[in-house]
Image (cartoon, rainbow, N blue to C red):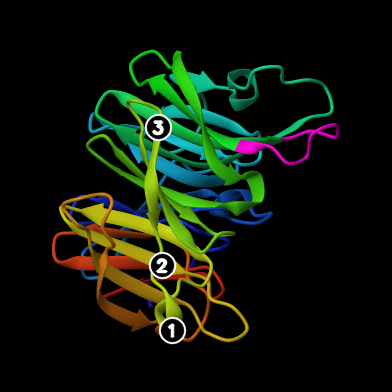
Amino acid sequence: PVGDLVYSEQVIAYGDGVVVANYGSDELSRRCLKTYSASGDHVSNLLLGTSFPTAVALRGDGTAWILLRGSNLIVCARLDDPTYSSAIMEINPERLHPDFADGDSCRVCDIGLAGDRLLILSATFTVNDPMQFSRVHVVDDRTGALLYQFLTDLLEYECGLFAVQDDMLFVAGFGTNRIHTYNWRQGSVEGHIRPEGDLAFRMPWGVAVSGKMLYVSEQGDEYVAGRIWILRLPDDVSSDATVVQVIPSPDGKELGGLCLNGGQLWCMGPDERMTHAN
């Protein structure tokens, strides 16, 4: 286990190690981005005082988009600032949703970069229509302007985290026990990845992709503890993915997001507030 983290659910490749958004509960001094080396050593705390950070999308120029759960904003900030003071750009997810009204609520599930596009997975809850599907908003990374958006086939409470590779978007269906795939450039549904029988997903939450390999972490349920899945993607989207390996949770607890960096696979263990490196 790596780290002393509070309510963190994501881990992102950074340098030769990772960066983790430390939610930090009520302690202002603990809300920050924590970085770790490939060996698991704590390296630094970035942007101290960030308002309940939960997701990070690194832009490659010393800045990053950060989802702030406390203010429900997505901000772009410099990573070399010792404390968080102001944003270079700011996105209010509520303004991305058509017909958003007073009394409605908006939840951003995840953010991620695909080239010069920022992808935002979010959903709204309204009193008049509680069964709304989540949306993917495609935003210009340079300006923060909304370019277009499309509906998914996932309800608000069914969404986990996502990964993107080229034109393909892989969304963990926490409430469907599937990985949902989309062509984000076309705004179209491509299909589902769902092992059957004893190898069925149990509340998948995190997803990462590298070439033809797909990595899925799950929270598990009352019957099966959380696991990490390694699957080989087919050449044809109409074919099933092949299960290569299933790794039990190191402590038998639910798992959060995961990422790859070099030859290491990192996975959050939110129940124990720490990261596991394998």
Which-is-in-front pick, marks 2 and 3? 3
Q: Amino acid at mark 3?
A: Ser
Q: Check disc 2 and report the residue beneath it.
A: 217
For the N terminus, give its image quadrant: bottom left
Q: Earlier in the sequence, mark 1 or mark 2?
A: 1
Q: CA distance from mark 2 to mark 3?
A: 25 Å
Would residue 131 be counted in the magenta stretch? yes
The residue to which callout 3 is attached is: 188
x, y percentage for residue 171? Answer: 43, 49
224 relative to 168, above or below: below
Mark number, residue 216: none
What is the three-letter code of the residue carrying label 1? Answer: Asp
Q: Is 79 part of what is drawn in magenta?
A: no
**Point 59% across, 55% down: residue:** 24
Taking depth in this image into account, of 184 and 267 the one nearest to the observer is 184
Q: Are marks 2 and 3 in contact (CB under 8 Å)?
A: no
Q: Secondary structure at mark 3?
A: strand
SS for dot 2: strand
Q: What secondary structure prevails in the magenta region?
A: loop
Badge 1 or badge 3: first in the primary sequence: 3
Report crowding for label 2: few under 14, some 14 to 19, many 20 or more residues within 10 A (C-alpha): many
Q: Earlier in the sequence, mark 2 or mark 3?
A: 3
Q: Residues within 10 Å of mark 3 (few under 14, many from 20)?
A: some
The answer for how far apart the CA atoms under marks 1 and 2 are is 16 Å
Indicate whether 182 appears above or below 268. above
For the C terminus, the image quarter is bottom left
| In the foreground, 48 or 119 | 119
Residue 232 as seen in the image, left or right of residue 197:
left
The mark found on residue 198 in the picture is 1
Q: Residue at x 33, y 72 (%)?
A: 229
Tell me if residue 222 comes above or below residue 217 in the rendering. Answer: below
